[in-house]
Image: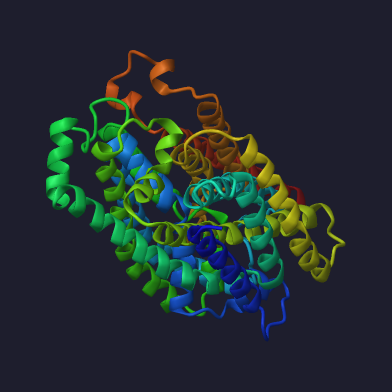
């Protein structure tokens, strides 16, 4: 056993132990297990939010996309900062409503706002599909990280199986408490390692960040800026708009909000998160630094650039430290995703069709579902392809289709009906699936359109049509309901 493997295994064991220990002294009913009894302060909410945001993508996809795609990667920092501004105003409203009505899932929020359990089923299904995509991304990243940093001693399949087993155990036992405590260790490691690598590589190989970009621009002119076609300015703007709207539409993003002890904790979190976004820049710098030093990687192979570059530069013990941090970067968000998927399935799908099920039975079912969800995600991980960035974009496009109905529900006088919300979400989801999974682009369907329109993110087109359908159906159903009410009044007269 080399020292890198020892580091990786040590961090894995410690993280699972912390996750299990987090249960100590707590009675794990559904509210405690899923939203921590609604008693978490600013620090834990911040760590949970960062835990879901800074994942294996921070280690792999961010640097890999910078290496492969250049300036388009800066869209992530832009939409992340805008999303936290939105959260400053939106999260307190969600928290107040959730506390008043004892909500524990995103789907619960839609059910209560629109008085429709079947809309809740639709939202739960979309949430489960999107979260499963993101869980697959975490497992796939875990396999990459462990295999690379263990120098091939631990296979990708073995890493995924063992990692999934560990996270399943502590999620079943401790729920969100395990995720929160494990986040502390994870964030300390990721902050330290990513910042160090992002500073070290540009200085070591180029003499600084500015000289690095000068060298890249000489070798590959205009690579660090947006191209005229493809991931162009219109793609960048549409992606930033879409992703900033959808950033907190993820079902597992609602868990920290529901778990907060106060509105003040959520506002403080929103003020701090843009600073944390800057950490991603250092991951980008690693990818940019590798362009001239480790050329030739294409497609999904570019996702491994941080690990490949680090193995060239550092001793095995430090590579093992990177591997340990990468394991934590996969386990923490995976725990939140597993918890969210199981809650949505048990509470917002199973209970709707089995209304006789008691709260105690649902609480047990939520925990028992976790290992089955892990197995399904493992299967999909071994079957899948695509780069990490591609998977993330597809999942974002899909989950963002919930946004119009969600934001409308926050209005004092919501003009959107449950039928309108249902129709908009269905149409948007179908269009995104059709375009992304079928790899159908606007440029192919309408080749004579201006380039700026052809480069728009597919998800923004689906979102626009979603809104139109939502408005039309809401107006029609409102008018029909009003006519029906008038007819009933006349009959009584």
How many tags in the picture?
A: 0
Q: Residue at x 45, y 35 (%)?
A: 300
Which quadrant is the N terminus positioned in?
Answer: bottom right
Q: Is 100 drawn above or below residue 368 in the view shown?
A: below
Q: Position of residue 464 (x, y in %)?
A: 43, 36
Q: Residue lying furthest bottom in this view?
A: 25
Q: Is residue 41 left or right of residue 75?
A: right
Measured along the vertical axis of the image, is residue 293 above or below residue 260?
A: above
**Residue 296 or residue 255, whichever sits in front:** 296
Q: Residue furthest front?
A: 1
In the picture provided, is 35 more to the left or to the right than 65? right
Side (left or right) of 35 relative to 91: right
Q: Nearer the viewer, residue 266 or 95?
A: 266
Tell me which residue sits at (24%, 37%) in the image. 292
The percent position of residue 153, horizontal first and vertical second, equals: 56, 49
Q: How is the image coloured?
A: rainbow
Observer-nearest of 341 and 87: 341
**Residue 235 seen in render:** yes
Foreground pick, 83 / 321: 321
Q: Quadrant of residue 213?
A: top left
Residue drawn at x 54%, y 24% is 438
Q: Residue 391: x percent and y percent?
A: 50, 39
Above or below, 281 against 303 in this view is below
Considering every residue shown, the one lying at the far right of the view is 356
Provide residue 174's location: percent of width, then percent of height. Answer: 66, 72
Can residue 109 be seen from the camera position used here? no
């Amino acid at each position: 056993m080399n020292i890198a493997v020892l580091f990786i295994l040590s961090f894995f064991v410690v993280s699972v132990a912390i996750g299990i220990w987090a249960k100590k002294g707590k009675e794990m009913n559904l509210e405690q297990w899923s939203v921590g009894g609604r008693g978490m302060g600013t620090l834990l909410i911040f760590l949970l939010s960062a835990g879901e945001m800074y994942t294996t993508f921070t280690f792999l996809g961010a640097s890999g996309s910078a290496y492969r795609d250049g300036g388009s990667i800066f869209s992530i920092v832009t939409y992340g900062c805008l999303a936290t501004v939105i959260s400053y105003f939106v999260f307190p409203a969600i928290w107040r409503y959730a506390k008043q009505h004892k909500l524990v899932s995103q789907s619960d929020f839609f059910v209560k706002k629109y008085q429709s359990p079947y809309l809740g089923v639709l939202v739960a299904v979309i949430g489960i599909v999107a979260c499963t995509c993101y869980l697959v991304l975490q497992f796939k990243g875990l396999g990459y990280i462990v295999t690379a940093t263990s120098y091939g001693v631990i296979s990708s399949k073995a890493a995924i199986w063992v990692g999934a087993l560990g996270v399943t155990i502590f999620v079943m036992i401790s729920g969100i408490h395990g995720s929160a405590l494990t986040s502390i260790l994870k964030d300390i490691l990721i902050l330290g390692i990513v910042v160090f690598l992002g500073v070290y590589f540009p200085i070591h190989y180029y003499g600084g960040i500015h000289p690095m970009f000068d060298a890249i621009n000489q070798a590959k002119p205009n690579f660090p800026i947006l191209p005229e076609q493809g991931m162009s300015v219109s793609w960048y703007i549409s992606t930033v708009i879409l992703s900033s709207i959808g950033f907190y539409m993820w079902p597992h993003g609602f868990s920290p909000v529901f778990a907060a002890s106060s509105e003040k904790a959520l506002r403080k979190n929103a003020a701090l998160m843009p600073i944390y976004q800057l950490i991603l820049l250092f991951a980008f710098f690693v990818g940019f630094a590798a362009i001239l030093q480790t050329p030739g990687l294409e497609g999904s192979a570019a996702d491994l650039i941080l690990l490949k570059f680090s193995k060239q530069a550092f001793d095995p013990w430090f590579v093992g430290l990177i591997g340990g941090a990468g394991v934590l970067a996969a386990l923490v968000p995976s725990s939140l995703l597993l918890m969210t998927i199981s809650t949505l399935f048990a509470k917002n799908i199973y209970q709707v069709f089995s209304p006789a099920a008691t709260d105690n039975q649902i609480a047990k079912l939520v925990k028992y579902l976790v290992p089955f969800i892990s197995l399904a995600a493992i299967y999909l991980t071994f079957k899948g392809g695509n780069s990490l960035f591609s998977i993330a974009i597809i999942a974002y496009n899909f989950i963002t289709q919930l946004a119009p109905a969600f934001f409308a529900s926050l209005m004092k006088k919501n003009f959107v009906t449950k039928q309108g919300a249902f129709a908009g979400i269905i149409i948007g989801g179908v269009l995104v699936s059709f375009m992304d999974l079928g790899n159908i682009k606007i440029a192919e369907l309408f080749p004579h359109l201006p380039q700026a329109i052809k480069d728009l993110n597919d998800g923004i087109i689906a979102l626009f049509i979603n809104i139109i359908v939502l408005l039309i159906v809401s107006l029609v159903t409102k008018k029909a309901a009003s006519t029906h009410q008038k007819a009933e009044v006349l009959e009584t007269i």
